[in-house]
Image: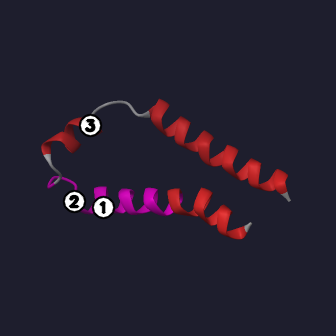
């Protein structure tokens, strides 16, 4: 079960952290299409990702 938890929670969180670090490091050197996407509001996207992570954790906890 630990393997499934790592796949369901750990992998998306690790990818999210790597993406945030990359965006902070390459602030003005990002491709034009990425800079254009960064100007759009992302509240819905972030909320949905957080909901997926929370529901995955809840599902894992209920299987115990």
Residue under label 1, please give it.
22
Q: Quadrant of residue 3?
A: bottom right
Do callouts 3 and 1 mark residues in contact (Cβ within 8 Å)?
A: no
Instruction: Tell me if mark 3 has few (under 14), some (14-19) or many (20+) residues whose alpha carbon lies within 10 angstroms of its own.
Output: few
Is 33 placed left or right of 38 in the picture? left
Compared with 36, 2 (above or below) is below
Question: Which image quadrant for residue 38?
Answer: top left
- The reply to whether discs 2 and 1 touch (Cβ–Cβ < 8 Å) is yes
Where residue 56 appears, as percent x and y from the top left, is 67, 49
Q: Nearer the viewer, residue 17 or 64?
A: 64
Work out which quarter of the rendered image holds the C terminus and state it.
bottom right
Secondary structure under tag 2 reads loop
Disc marking residue 37: 3
Q: Residues within 10 Å of mark 2 (few under 14, many from 20)?
A: few
Number of residues whose C-alpha sits closer than 10 Å to that of mark 1, classed few (under 14), some (14–19) or many (20 or more): few
Identify the residue under disc 2: 26
Identify the magenta region: 13-29
- Is residue 27 found inside the magenta-colored segment of the image? yes
Q: Earlier in the sequence, mark 2 or mark 3?
A: 2
């Amino acid at each position: 079960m630990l393997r499934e938890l790592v796949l369901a929670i750990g992998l998306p969180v690790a990818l999210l952290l790597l993406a945030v670090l990359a965006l902070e490091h390459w602030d003005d050197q990002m491709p034009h299409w990425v800079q254009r996407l960064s100007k759009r509001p992302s509240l819905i996207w972030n909320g949905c990702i957080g909901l997926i992570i929370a529901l995955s954790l809840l599902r894992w906890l209920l299987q115990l």
